[in-house]
Image (tube, rainbow, N blue to C red):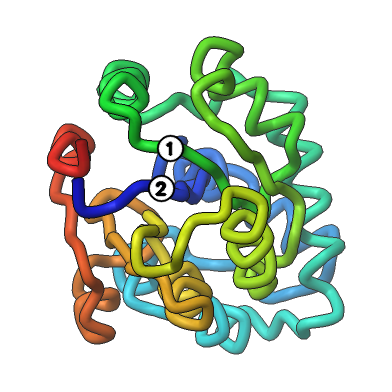
Amino acid sequence: MKYRLAIFDFDGTLADSLPFLLSVVNKLAERHAFRPIDLDAVPAFRHYSAREMMRHLELPAWKLPLVAQSFMTLMQQNPQATPLFANVDSVLQQLARAQLRLALVSSNARHNVEQILGASNIGLFGHLECGMSIFGKASRIRKILRLTGTPASQVVYIGDQITDLEAARQEGVAFGAVTWGYGSIESLRRHAPDEEFAQFTDLLRLA
């Protein structure tokens, strides 16, 4: 087994939350006074990094926690609007049976993660780190490495955005890019991810 520990992102990696985000983003823009988006331009936005998107939306960094909290509250009120991607349940179970340790690092609220993943899936994860800034994941990855005693060389962080890749690189762990998330695979390939997964069942090669 190449890796002993797989750390997962949540939104755009395990949970298909982009459609819900797009359904509420302009409501959030009105509430928090940032630039609304033209939904027809969303395919182009998937090539942006988080920082580039914030500049486009004229969303200052100090407002980001407020916007994130509003989004998480709306998701908590509408959990049925955010399904898991196909095959998440079976693949996670197979990885766990193969004795690959699983953990999760997400900027989303723990309540949302638990509600959407469900109790049977949550029980597969040895560690859940939730609720940090999208730019604050590196320290949570470091915490999991310390708690599990796993060398960085034996860890992969699986995510869908450049901020995920940057966090993995900062902590010296491999990064696995998924093709189905918020960020386009082309934008991630420019940073040479260590692994690439075209569909969720491709993750079985980690077992």
Q: Quadrant of residue 192?
A: bottom left
Between 177 and 147, the one lying in front of the other is: 147
Query: For this view, does 80 lie left or right of residue 14?
Result: right
Query: For this view, does 85 lie left or right of residue 125?
Result: left
Q: Is residue 13 above or below residue 126?
A: below
Q: Which residue is mark 1?
A: 101
| x and y, in percent, of residue 193 in the image | 25, 73
Query: For this view, does 55 lie left or right of residue 3?
Result: right
Circle 1: residue type: Arg
Q: Earlier in the sequence, mark 1 or mark 2?
A: 2
Q: Dot 2: what SS?
A: strand
Q: Dot 1: what SS?
A: strand
| x and y, in percent, of residue 121 in the image | 50, 19
Circle 2: residue type: Leu
Between 122 and 95, the one lying in front of the other is: 95
Q: Which residue is mark 2?
A: 5
The residue that appears at 22% across and 37% down in the rendered structure is 200
Q: Residues within 10 Å of mark 2 (few under 14, many from 20)?
A: many
Q: Residues within 10 Å of mark 1 (few under 14, many from 20)?
A: many
The residue that appears at 72% across and 66% down in the rendered structure is 133
Quadrant for the N terminus in the image: top left
| x and y, in percent, of residue 155 in the image | 39, 58
| x and y, in percent, of residue 56 in the image | 56, 85
Q: Mark 1 and 2 residues: CB-CB less than 8 Å, in contact?
A: yes
Q: Is residue 203 above or below residue 3?
A: above
Between 94 and 78, the one lying in front of the other is: 94
Quadrant for the C terminus in the image: top left
Q: Is residue 140 above or below residue 122?
A: below
Between 165 and 173, the one lying in front of the other is: 173
The residue that appears at 66% across and 25% down in the rendered structure is 114
Q: CA distance from mark 1 to mark 2?
A: 5 Å
